[in-house]
Image (cartoon, rainbow, N blue to C red):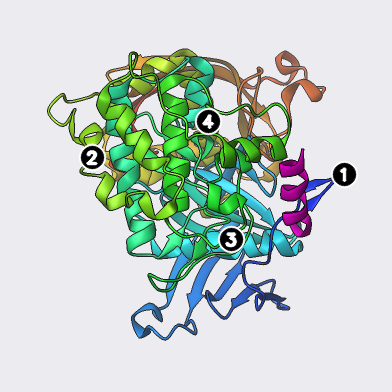
Amino acid sequence: MAGLEELKKKLAPLFDAEKGFSSGSPLDTSDSYLLSDGSTVNLLSKSYGNYNINEFGLQKCSSWSVDESQNNEKTYNCSSHEMRIFGAIGSGASSVVQRAIYIPTHRSLALKRINIFEKEKRQQLLTEIRTLCEAPCSEGLVEFHGAFYTPDSGQISIALEYMDGGSLADILRVQKCIPEPVLSAMFEKLLHGLTYLHGVRHLVHRDIKPANLLVNLKGEPKITDFGISAGLENSMAMCATFVGTVTYMSPERIRTDNYSYPADIWSLGLALFECGTGEFPYTANDGPVNLMLQILDDPSPSPPKDKFSPEFCSFIDVCLQKEADARPTAELLLTHPFITKYDHSKVDLAAFVRNVFDPVQRLKDLADMLTIHYYLLFDGPNEQWHHIRTLYNEDSTFSFAGKKSVGPNQIFKATSSIRSTLAGDWPTEKLVHVVEELRCRPHGQDGVAIRVSGSFIHGNQFLICGEGVQADGIPNFKDLSIDIPSKRVGTFKEQFIMEPGKSIGCYVIVDQELYIMK
Protein backbone atom coordinates (compact mmCIF):
# COMPACT_ATOMS: atom_id res chain seq x y z
CA MET A 1 0.00 0.00 0.00
CA ALA A 2 2.94 2.31 0.64
CA GLY A 3 3.94 2.00 -2.99
CA LEU A 4 0.40 2.76 -4.10
CA GLU A 5 0.21 5.91 -1.99
CA GLU A 6 3.64 7.03 -3.15
CA LEU A 7 2.63 6.63 -6.79
CA LYS A 8 -0.63 8.51 -6.21
CA LYS A 9 1.28 11.42 -4.67
CA LYS A 10 3.69 11.50 -7.58
CA LEU A 11 0.83 11.54 -10.06
CA ALA A 12 -1.26 14.04 -8.07
CA PRO A 13 -0.98 16.84 -10.65
CA LEU A 14 -2.22 14.45 -13.32
CA PHE A 15 -4.82 12.43 -11.46
CA ASP A 16 -8.24 13.32 -10.07
CA ALA A 17 -9.64 10.76 -7.63
CA GLU A 18 -13.17 11.18 -8.98
CA LYS A 19 -12.55 11.76 -12.69
CA GLY A 20 -9.41 9.69 -13.27
CA PHE A 21 -6.52 10.88 -15.40
CA SER A 22 -6.46 14.40 -16.66
CA SER A 23 -5.79 15.20 -20.28
CA GLY A 24 -2.15 15.94 -19.57
CA SER A 25 0.00 18.98 -19.90
CA PRO A 26 -0.55 21.32 -22.83
CA LEU A 27 1.18 20.16 -25.96
CA ASP A 28 2.01 23.69 -27.02
CA THR A 29 1.24 26.54 -24.66
CA SER A 30 1.57 29.09 -27.44
CA ASP A 31 -1.17 27.68 -29.65
CA SER A 32 -4.27 29.69 -30.44
CA TYR A 33 -6.94 29.95 -33.07
CA LEU A 34 -8.76 32.70 -34.91
CA LEU A 35 -12.10 32.54 -36.68
CA SER A 36 -12.30 35.05 -39.50
CA ASP A 37 -15.45 36.65 -40.89
CA GLY A 38 -15.06 34.45 -43.94
CA SER A 39 -15.53 31.29 -41.84
CA THR A 40 -11.85 30.38 -42.05
CA VAL A 41 -10.20 28.87 -38.99
CA ASN A 42 -6.59 29.90 -38.44
CA LEU A 43 -4.79 27.40 -36.22
CA LEU A 44 -1.59 29.00 -34.97
CA SER A 45 1.38 27.47 -33.20
CA LYS A 46 4.95 28.68 -32.81
CA SER A 47 6.24 25.15 -33.18
CA TYR A 48 3.76 23.85 -35.78
CA GLY A 49 3.12 26.79 -38.09
CA ASN A 50 -0.07 28.35 -39.40
CA TYR A 51 -2.94 26.29 -40.83
CA ASN A 52 -5.87 28.01 -42.54
CA ILE A 53 -8.92 25.76 -42.80
CA ASN A 54 -12.29 26.62 -44.30
CA GLU A 55 -15.16 24.85 -46.06
CA PHE A 56 -13.01 24.38 -49.16
CA GLY A 57 -9.92 22.79 -47.66
CA LEU A 58 -6.64 23.31 -45.83
CA GLN A 59 -3.63 25.50 -46.48
CA LYS A 60 -0.43 25.21 -44.49
CA CYS A 61 1.35 28.55 -44.41
CA SER A 62 4.96 29.34 -43.52
CA SER A 63 6.08 28.17 -40.09
CA TRP A 64 8.44 29.65 -37.56
CA SER A 65 10.83 26.73 -37.93
CA VAL A 66 14.50 27.56 -38.26
CA ASP A 67 14.67 24.87 -40.92
CA GLU A 68 13.80 26.79 -44.08
CA SER A 69 13.19 23.56 -45.97
CA GLN A 70 10.01 23.12 -43.91
CA ASN A 71 8.63 26.58 -44.69
CA ASN A 72 6.95 25.49 -47.90
CA GLU A 73 3.23 26.03 -48.28
CA LYS A 74 0.88 23.13 -48.91
CA THR A 75 -2.73 23.21 -50.07
CA TYR A 76 -5.30 20.42 -49.83
CA ASN A 77 -8.54 21.05 -51.73
CA CYS A 78 -11.06 19.01 -49.80
CA SER A 79 -14.45 20.72 -49.71
CA SER A 80 -17.19 19.89 -47.24
CA HIS A 81 -19.69 20.27 -50.10
CA GLU A 82 -17.95 17.49 -52.03
CA MET A 83 -18.27 14.85 -49.32
CA ARG A 84 -20.92 12.15 -49.27
CA ILE A 85 -21.16 11.08 -45.62
CA PHE A 86 -22.53 7.68 -44.60
CA GLY A 87 -22.62 7.83 -40.82
CA ALA A 88 -20.28 7.00 -37.94
CA ILE A 89 -17.92 4.02 -38.02
CA GLY A 90 -16.26 4.75 -34.69
CA SER A 91 -15.69 7.29 -31.95
CA GLY A 92 -13.09 8.16 -29.36
CA ALA A 93 -12.60 10.52 -26.46
CA SER A 94 -12.03 13.54 -28.68
CA SER A 95 -13.50 12.73 -32.09
CA VAL A 96 -16.07 10.89 -34.18
CA VAL A 97 -15.03 8.99 -37.32
CA GLN A 98 -17.43 8.78 -40.26
CA ARG A 99 -17.22 6.95 -43.56
CA ALA A 100 -17.54 9.13 -46.64
CA ILE A 101 -17.06 9.26 -50.40
CA TYR A 102 -15.18 12.20 -51.89
CA ILE A 103 -17.36 13.06 -54.88
CA PRO A 104 -14.74 14.30 -57.40
CA THR A 105 -12.70 11.07 -57.17
CA HIS A 106 -15.39 8.68 -55.85
CA ARG A 107 -12.91 7.57 -53.21
CA SER A 108 -13.95 6.10 -49.86
CA LEU A 109 -12.47 8.06 -46.98
CA ALA A 110 -12.66 8.20 -43.20
CA LEU A 111 -13.61 11.61 -41.79
CA LYS A 112 -12.34 12.34 -38.31
CA ARG A 113 -14.40 15.19 -36.85
CA ILE A 114 -13.07 17.32 -33.97
CA ASN A 115 -14.63 20.31 -32.18
CA ILE A 116 -12.25 23.29 -32.36
CA PHE A 117 -13.76 25.19 -29.44
CA GLU A 118 -12.27 22.85 -26.81
CA LYS A 119 -8.64 23.72 -26.10
CA GLU A 120 -7.42 20.17 -25.51
CA LYS A 121 -8.99 18.89 -28.71
CA ARG A 122 -7.63 21.87 -30.63
CA GLN A 123 -4.11 21.04 -29.48
CA GLN A 124 -4.55 17.43 -30.55
CA LEU A 125 -5.92 18.63 -33.87
CA LEU A 126 -2.85 20.79 -34.47
CA THR A 127 -0.56 17.87 -33.72
CA GLU A 128 -2.42 15.45 -35.95
CA ILE A 129 -2.67 17.84 -38.90
CA ARG A 130 1.00 18.73 -38.63
CA THR A 131 2.04 15.07 -38.59
CA LEU A 132 -0.23 14.14 -41.49
CA CYS A 133 0.78 17.16 -43.59
CA GLU A 134 4.44 16.25 -43.26
CA ALA A 135 3.90 12.57 -44.04
CA PRO A 136 0.84 12.33 -46.32
CA CYS A 137 1.89 9.14 -48.15
CA SER A 138 4.52 7.38 -46.03
CA GLU A 139 4.62 3.59 -45.81
CA GLY A 140 3.06 2.30 -42.63
CA LEU A 141 1.12 5.51 -41.92
CA VAL A 142 -2.52 6.19 -42.76
CA GLU A 143 -2.72 8.43 -45.84
CA PHE A 144 -3.88 12.05 -45.46
CA HIS A 145 -6.26 13.67 -47.97
CA GLY A 146 -6.92 17.08 -46.41
CA ALA A 147 -9.20 18.80 -43.94
CA PHE A 148 -12.10 21.25 -43.94
CA TYR A 149 -14.11 23.34 -41.49
CA THR A 150 -17.90 23.19 -41.05
CA PRO A 151 -19.09 26.51 -39.55
CA ASP A 152 -22.54 25.22 -38.58
CA SER A 153 -21.11 22.55 -36.28
CA GLY A 154 -17.85 24.24 -35.27
CA GLN A 155 -16.00 21.08 -36.30
CA ILE A 156 -12.93 20.43 -38.38
CA SER A 157 -12.94 17.19 -40.36
CA ILE A 158 -9.70 15.42 -41.23
CA ALA A 159 -9.99 13.26 -44.36
CA LEU A 160 -8.01 10.04 -44.06
CA GLU A 161 -7.57 6.86 -46.04
CA TYR A 162 -10.41 4.47 -45.23
CA MET A 163 -8.95 1.27 -43.78
CA ASP A 164 -11.66 -1.24 -44.62
CA GLY A 165 -10.13 -4.11 -42.64
CA GLY A 166 -10.53 -2.36 -39.28
CA SER A 167 -7.90 -2.48 -36.53
CA LEU A 168 -5.83 -5.26 -35.00
CA ALA A 169 -8.08 -4.88 -31.96
CA ASP A 170 -11.07 -5.66 -34.21
CA ILE A 171 -9.30 -8.77 -35.49
CA LEU A 172 -8.61 -9.94 -31.92
CA ARG A 173 -12.31 -9.62 -31.12
CA VAL A 174 -13.10 -12.02 -33.96
CA GLN A 175 -10.32 -14.54 -33.40
CA LYS A 176 -8.23 -15.11 -30.30
CA CYS A 177 -4.80 -14.40 -31.76
CA ILE A 178 -2.91 -13.67 -34.97
CA PRO A 179 -0.38 -16.20 -36.38
CA GLU A 180 3.31 -15.35 -36.12
CA PRO A 181 4.02 -15.22 -39.89
CA VAL A 182 1.18 -12.71 -40.34
CA LEU A 183 2.40 -10.60 -37.42
CA SER A 184 5.95 -10.64 -38.76
CA ALA A 185 4.83 -9.28 -42.13
CA MET A 186 2.49 -6.73 -40.55
CA PHE A 187 4.96 -5.41 -38.00
CA GLU A 188 7.65 -5.02 -40.64
CA LYS A 189 5.44 -2.48 -42.41
CA LEU A 190 4.46 -0.82 -39.13
CA LEU A 191 8.13 -0.49 -38.20
CA HIS A 192 8.75 1.38 -41.45
CA GLY A 193 6.06 3.86 -40.40
CA LEU A 194 7.50 4.17 -36.90
CA THR A 195 11.02 4.61 -38.31
CA TYR A 196 9.74 7.50 -40.41
CA LEU A 197 7.97 9.10 -37.44
CA HIS A 198 11.04 8.81 -35.22
CA GLY A 199 13.90 9.29 -37.65
CA VAL A 200 12.51 11.80 -40.16
CA ARG A 201 9.66 13.62 -38.45
CA HIS A 202 11.17 13.38 -34.93
CA LEU A 203 7.82 12.46 -33.39
CA VAL A 204 6.89 10.19 -30.50
CA HIS A 205 3.46 8.71 -31.24
CA ARG A 206 2.63 8.09 -27.55
CA ASP A 207 -0.44 5.93 -28.18
CA ILE A 208 0.68 2.79 -30.01
CA LYS A 209 -1.88 0.05 -29.33
CA PRO A 210 -3.84 -2.55 -31.36
CA ALA A 211 -6.78 -0.15 -31.79
CA ASN A 212 -4.48 2.37 -33.52
CA LEU A 213 -2.91 -0.20 -35.85
CA LEU A 214 -5.25 -0.43 -38.83
CA VAL A 215 -5.31 -2.73 -41.84
CA ASN A 216 -7.09 -2.62 -45.18
CA LEU A 217 -8.45 -5.51 -47.24
CA LYS A 218 -5.27 -5.46 -49.32
CA GLY A 219 -3.46 -6.53 -46.16
CA GLU A 220 -1.60 -3.25 -45.62
CA PRO A 221 -1.18 -2.36 -41.92
CA LYS A 222 -0.82 1.32 -40.98
CA ILE A 223 -0.48 3.48 -37.88
CA THR A 224 -3.19 6.05 -37.17
CA ASP A 225 -4.28 8.58 -34.53
CA PHE A 226 -1.47 11.12 -34.23
CA GLY A 227 -3.46 13.50 -32.05
CA ILE A 228 -1.20 13.18 -29.02
CA SER A 229 2.14 12.62 -30.72
CA ALA A 230 4.89 14.97 -29.62
CA GLY A 231 7.67 16.57 -31.59
CA LEU A 232 11.31 16.21 -30.57
CA GLU A 233 13.31 18.64 -32.67
CA ASN A 234 16.67 17.03 -31.93
CA SER A 235 17.93 13.63 -30.94
CA MET A 236 18.50 14.66 -27.31
CA ALA A 237 15.02 16.11 -26.74
CA MET A 238 12.70 14.39 -24.30
CA CYS A 239 8.96 14.57 -23.60
CA ALA A 240 7.60 15.35 -20.16
CA THR A 241 3.82 15.02 -20.55
CA PHE A 242 1.43 12.32 -19.37
CA VAL A 243 -0.92 11.52 -22.25
CA GLY A 244 -1.89 8.35 -24.07
CA THR A 245 -3.42 5.02 -23.14
CA VAL A 246 -2.22 3.93 -19.68
CA THR A 247 -2.51 0.26 -20.60
CA TYR A 248 0.39 0.40 -23.06
CA MET A 249 2.46 3.04 -21.26
CA SER A 250 6.17 2.46 -20.67
CA PRO A 251 7.73 2.44 -17.17
CA GLU A 252 9.52 5.76 -17.66
CA ARG A 253 6.27 7.43 -18.65
CA ILE A 254 4.46 6.02 -15.62
CA ARG A 255 7.23 7.35 -13.39
CA THR A 256 6.62 10.74 -15.08
CA ASP A 257 10.26 10.80 -16.12
CA ASN A 258 11.32 12.40 -19.36
CA TYR A 259 10.92 9.98 -22.25
CA SER A 260 11.57 9.68 -25.95
CA TYR A 261 11.21 7.25 -28.88
CA PRO A 262 11.81 4.10 -26.78
CA ALA A 263 8.40 4.70 -25.16
CA ASP A 264 6.80 3.78 -28.50
CA ILE A 265 8.95 0.64 -28.72
CA TRP A 266 7.61 -0.55 -25.35
CA SER A 267 4.03 0.02 -26.54
CA LEU A 268 4.76 -1.79 -29.80
CA GLY A 269 6.12 -4.78 -27.88
CA LEU A 270 3.00 -4.96 -25.70
CA ALA A 271 0.78 -4.70 -28.78
CA LEU A 272 2.67 -7.57 -30.44
CA PHE A 273 2.44 -9.64 -27.24
CA GLU A 274 -1.33 -9.18 -27.13
CA CYS A 275 -1.81 -9.88 -30.84
CA GLY A 276 0.34 -13.02 -30.78
CA THR A 277 -0.85 -14.59 -27.53
CA GLY A 278 -4.41 -13.27 -27.50
CA GLU A 279 -3.93 -11.97 -23.97
CA PHE A 280 -2.84 -8.69 -22.46
CA PRO A 281 0.03 -9.60 -20.09
CA TYR A 282 -1.04 -7.43 -17.16
CA THR A 283 -4.18 -7.43 -15.00
CA ALA A 284 -6.08 -4.32 -16.02
CA ASN A 285 -9.32 -4.92 -14.09
CA ASP A 286 -8.21 -3.41 -10.77
CA GLY A 287 -7.90 0.17 -11.95
CA PRO A 288 -5.17 2.20 -13.66
CA VAL A 289 -3.01 2.77 -10.57
CA ASN A 290 -2.71 -0.95 -9.81
CA LEU A 291 -1.93 -1.56 -13.47
CA MET A 292 0.87 0.99 -13.36
CA LEU A 293 2.31 -0.59 -10.23
CA GLN A 294 2.44 -3.93 -12.06
CA ILE A 295 4.29 -2.36 -14.97
CA LEU A 296 6.78 -0.71 -12.62
CA ASP A 297 7.34 -3.52 -10.11
CA ASP A 298 6.70 -6.82 -11.91
CA PRO A 299 9.26 -8.38 -14.25
CA SER A 300 8.64 -7.56 -17.88
CA PRO A 301 6.23 -10.07 -19.41
CA SER A 302 7.55 -12.68 -21.83
CA PRO A 303 5.58 -15.15 -23.98
CA PRO A 304 5.70 -18.85 -23.03
CA LYS A 305 8.85 -20.22 -24.64
CA ASP A 306 7.23 -23.62 -25.27
CA LYS A 307 4.36 -22.14 -27.30
CA PHE A 308 6.04 -19.46 -29.39
CA SER A 309 9.12 -19.25 -31.57
CA PRO A 310 12.44 -18.01 -30.12
CA GLU A 311 12.37 -15.12 -32.59
CA PHE A 312 8.91 -13.97 -31.46
CA CYS A 313 9.88 -14.17 -27.78
CA SER A 314 13.17 -12.38 -28.41
CA PHE A 315 11.49 -9.51 -30.26
CA ILE A 316 9.09 -8.91 -27.39
CA ASP A 317 11.83 -9.27 -24.77
CA VAL A 318 13.99 -6.56 -26.35
CA CYS A 319 11.01 -4.22 -26.73
CA LEU A 320 9.95 -4.68 -23.10
CA GLN A 321 13.24 -3.80 -21.46
CA LYS A 322 12.54 -1.79 -18.31
CA GLU A 323 15.38 0.60 -19.10
CA ALA A 324 14.47 2.77 -22.07
CA ASP A 325 18.07 2.99 -23.32
CA ALA A 326 18.21 -0.81 -23.60
CA ARG A 327 15.41 -0.95 -26.17
CA PRO A 328 16.40 -1.01 -29.85
CA THR A 329 15.25 1.64 -32.30
CA ALA A 330 12.46 0.98 -34.80
CA GLU A 331 15.05 1.00 -37.58
CA LEU A 332 17.18 -1.61 -35.81
CA LEU A 333 14.13 -3.80 -35.17
CA LEU A 334 13.64 -4.08 -38.94
CA THR A 335 16.67 -6.39 -38.95
CA HIS A 336 15.47 -8.52 -36.02
CA PRO A 337 15.19 -12.28 -36.82
CA PHE A 338 11.44 -12.24 -36.11
CA ILE A 339 10.96 -9.67 -38.89
CA THR A 340 13.32 -11.34 -41.39
CA LYS A 341 12.35 -14.94 -40.60
CA TYR A 342 9.41 -15.07 -43.02
CA ASP A 343 10.87 -12.93 -45.82
CA HIS A 344 10.70 -15.80 -48.32
CA SER A 345 7.39 -17.26 -47.14
CA LYS A 346 5.25 -14.86 -49.20
CA VAL A 347 2.72 -14.32 -46.43
CA ASP A 348 -0.64 -13.35 -47.97
CA LEU A 349 -1.82 -10.59 -45.64
CA ALA A 350 -4.79 -9.75 -47.87
CA ALA A 351 -6.11 -13.32 -47.68
CA PHE A 352 -5.72 -13.33 -43.90
CA VAL A 353 -7.66 -10.08 -43.42
CA ARG A 354 -10.41 -11.11 -45.84
CA ASN A 355 -10.91 -14.42 -44.03
CA VAL A 356 -11.34 -12.73 -40.65
CA PHE A 357 -14.44 -10.67 -41.34
CA ASP A 358 -17.85 -11.47 -42.82
CA PRO A 359 -17.41 -10.75 -46.54
CA VAL A 360 -21.16 -10.76 -47.20
CA GLN A 361 -21.95 -7.80 -44.95
CA ARG A 362 -18.96 -5.82 -46.18
CA LEU A 363 -20.02 -6.43 -49.78
CA LYS A 364 -23.57 -5.34 -48.98
CA ASP A 365 -22.36 -2.13 -47.31
CA LEU A 366 -20.13 -1.38 -50.30
CA ALA A 367 -22.99 -1.98 -52.75
CA ASP A 368 -25.31 0.29 -50.73
CA MET A 369 -22.76 3.10 -50.68
CA LEU A 370 -21.87 2.91 -54.37
CA THR A 371 -25.53 2.73 -55.38
CA ILE A 372 -26.52 5.71 -53.25
CA HIS A 373 -23.52 7.65 -54.52
CA TYR A 374 -24.42 7.01 -58.16
CA TYR A 375 -28.10 7.96 -57.90
CA LEU A 376 -27.38 11.04 -55.79
CA LEU A 377 -25.15 12.20 -58.63
CA PHE A 378 -27.78 11.33 -61.24
CA ASP A 379 -30.69 13.01 -59.43
CA GLY A 380 -28.56 15.69 -57.78
CA PRO A 381 -27.40 19.21 -58.70
CA ASN A 382 -26.02 19.94 -62.15
CA GLU A 383 -22.75 21.31 -60.76
CA GLN A 384 -21.80 17.85 -59.47
CA TRP A 385 -23.06 15.80 -62.41
CA HIS A 386 -19.85 16.20 -64.45
CA HIS A 387 -17.98 14.11 -61.86
CA ILE A 388 -19.82 11.06 -63.23
CA ARG A 389 -17.22 10.89 -66.03
CA THR A 390 -14.53 9.66 -63.65
CA LEU A 391 -16.73 6.74 -62.56
CA TYR A 392 -15.87 5.09 -65.89
CA ASN A 393 -12.67 4.06 -67.64
CA GLU A 394 -11.89 3.91 -71.35
CA ASP A 395 -13.20 0.34 -71.68
CA SER A 396 -16.41 0.85 -69.68
CA THR A 397 -19.71 0.11 -71.44
CA PHE A 398 -23.25 1.42 -70.94
CA SER A 399 -26.24 -0.25 -72.62
CA PHE A 400 -29.70 1.29 -72.98
CA ALA A 401 -32.52 0.86 -75.52
CA GLY A 402 -30.43 -1.39 -77.74
CA LYS A 403 -27.51 1.04 -77.94
CA LYS A 404 -24.08 0.60 -76.38
CA SER A 405 -21.82 3.48 -75.36
CA VAL A 406 -18.12 2.93 -74.67
CA GLY A 407 -15.77 5.09 -72.62
CA PRO A 408 -16.38 8.08 -70.33
CA ASN A 409 -17.30 10.59 -73.04
CA GLN A 410 -19.88 8.45 -74.83
CA ILE A 411 -21.38 7.23 -71.57
CA PHE A 412 -21.56 10.77 -70.19
CA LYS A 413 -23.39 11.92 -73.31
CA ALA A 414 -25.86 9.01 -73.18
CA THR A 415 -26.60 9.26 -69.46
CA SER A 416 -26.86 13.06 -69.64
CA SER A 417 -29.54 12.71 -72.31
CA ILE A 418 -31.54 10.31 -70.13
CA ARG A 419 -31.05 12.57 -67.12
CA SER A 420 -32.30 15.60 -69.06
CA THR A 421 -35.40 13.72 -70.19
CA LEU A 422 -36.22 12.62 -66.64
CA ALA A 423 -35.68 16.16 -65.31
CA GLY A 424 -38.36 17.59 -67.60
CA ASP A 425 -38.79 21.26 -68.47
CA TRP A 426 -40.06 22.38 -65.06
CA PRO A 427 -39.08 21.46 -61.49
CA THR A 428 -42.52 19.97 -60.85
CA GLU A 429 -42.00 17.58 -63.77
CA LYS A 430 -38.71 16.12 -62.46
CA LEU A 431 -38.63 12.36 -62.00
CA VAL A 432 -36.32 10.83 -59.40
CA HIS A 433 -35.28 7.28 -58.59
CA VAL A 434 -36.69 5.28 -55.70
CA VAL A 435 -34.59 2.14 -55.23
CA GLU A 436 -36.93 -0.53 -53.89
CA GLU A 437 -34.71 -3.58 -54.21
CA LEU A 438 -30.93 -3.99 -54.26
CA ARG A 439 -29.03 -7.22 -54.71
CA CYS A 440 -25.30 -7.77 -54.97
CA ARG A 441 -22.75 -10.52 -55.44
CA PRO A 442 -18.97 -10.73 -55.73
CA HIS A 443 -17.52 -10.17 -59.19
CA GLY A 444 -14.04 -11.46 -59.89
CA GLN A 445 -11.47 -11.08 -57.13
CA ASP A 446 -12.38 -7.65 -55.76
CA GLY A 447 -15.33 -6.40 -57.79
CA VAL A 448 -19.05 -6.28 -57.06
CA ALA A 449 -22.10 -6.83 -59.26
CA ILE A 450 -25.10 -4.73 -58.22
CA ARG A 451 -28.66 -5.15 -59.49
CA VAL A 452 -31.27 -2.57 -58.53
CA SER A 453 -34.92 -2.10 -59.35
CA GLY A 454 -37.38 0.58 -58.40
CA SER A 455 -39.74 3.32 -59.45
CA PHE A 456 -39.73 6.84 -60.84
CA ILE A 457 -41.80 9.40 -58.94
CA HIS A 458 -42.14 13.17 -59.16
CA GLY A 459 -39.88 14.86 -56.62
CA ASN A 460 -36.48 16.40 -55.99
CA GLN A 461 -34.83 13.78 -53.76
CA PHE A 462 -33.49 10.32 -54.54
CA LEU A 463 -34.79 7.71 -52.07
CA ILE A 464 -33.79 4.18 -51.16
CA CYS A 465 -35.88 1.63 -49.28
CA GLY A 466 -34.60 -0.90 -46.78
CA GLU A 467 -32.41 -1.02 -43.69
CA GLY A 468 -29.00 -0.75 -45.33
CA VAL A 469 -26.41 2.01 -45.25
CA GLN A 470 -27.91 5.50 -45.21
CA ALA A 471 -26.30 8.73 -46.38
CA ASP A 472 -26.51 11.95 -44.40
CA GLY A 473 -29.12 14.28 -45.84
CA ILE A 474 -31.32 11.55 -47.29
CA PRO A 475 -34.54 11.00 -45.34
CA ASN A 476 -35.12 7.48 -44.09
CA PHE A 477 -37.80 6.01 -46.33
CA LYS A 478 -39.67 4.37 -43.46
CA ASP A 479 -40.13 7.81 -41.86
CA LEU A 480 -41.89 9.12 -44.96
CA SER A 481 -45.55 8.64 -45.74
CA ILE A 482 -45.13 7.82 -49.41
CA ASP A 483 -47.36 5.34 -51.21
CA ILE A 484 -45.08 4.33 -54.07
CA PRO A 485 -47.71 2.53 -56.22
CA SER A 486 -49.97 5.59 -56.25
CA LYS A 487 -47.10 7.93 -57.17
CA ARG A 488 -45.29 5.63 -59.59
CA VAL A 489 -44.77 7.13 -63.05
CA GLY A 490 -42.54 4.36 -64.35
CA THR A 491 -40.15 1.62 -63.25
CA PHE A 492 -36.52 0.81 -63.93
CA LYS A 493 -34.01 -1.98 -63.59
CA GLU A 494 -30.28 -1.36 -63.68
CA GLN A 495 -27.18 -3.49 -63.31
CA PHE A 496 -23.66 -2.31 -62.51
CA ILE A 497 -20.39 -4.22 -62.57
CA MET A 498 -17.90 -2.29 -60.46
CA GLU A 499 -14.21 -3.02 -60.00
CA PRO A 500 -11.47 -1.35 -57.93
CA GLY A 501 -9.84 1.64 -59.61
CA LYS A 502 -6.18 2.56 -59.65
CA SER A 503 -6.33 4.23 -56.22
CA ILE A 504 -7.20 2.45 -52.98
CA GLY A 505 -10.83 3.04 -52.05
CA CYS A 506 -11.92 3.95 -55.59
CA TYR A 507 -14.29 1.91 -57.77
CA VAL A 508 -15.15 2.30 -61.45
CA ILE A 509 -18.17 1.07 -63.40
CA VAL A 510 -16.91 -1.33 -66.07
CA ASP A 511 -20.33 -2.41 -67.35
CA GLN A 512 -23.81 -0.91 -66.90
CA GLU A 513 -27.21 -1.89 -68.30
CA LEU A 514 -30.38 0.19 -67.90
CA TYR A 515 -33.98 -0.78 -68.61
CA ILE A 516 -36.86 1.72 -68.22
CA MET A 517 -40.50 0.65 -68.28
CA LYS A 518 -43.49 2.99 -68.31
Q: State the residue at coordinates (57%, 55%).
A: 227
Front position among marks 3 and 2: 2
Q: State left or right for residue 350 relative to residue 270.
A: left
The three-letter amino acid code for the residue at tag 3 is: Phe
Q: Quadrant of the C terminus?
A: top right
Q: State left or right for residue 61 relative to residue 4.
A: left
Specify the farthest residue to the right.
18
**First along the sequence among labels 4 and 2:** 2
**First along the sequence among labels 1 and 3:** 1
Disc 4: which residue: 369
Q: Badge 1 local density, few (<14 within 10 Å), some, or many (20+)?
A: few
SS at badge 4 = helix
Task: Give the main secondary structure of the magenta stretch.
Answer: helix
Label 4 close to label 3 by CB (< 8 Å): no
Q: What is the x, y in percent for residue 428? A: 71, 40
Disc 3: which residue: 148
Front position among marks 4 and 1: 1
Q: What is the x, y in percent for residue 301? A: 47, 30
Label 4 close to label 2 by CB (< 8 Å): no
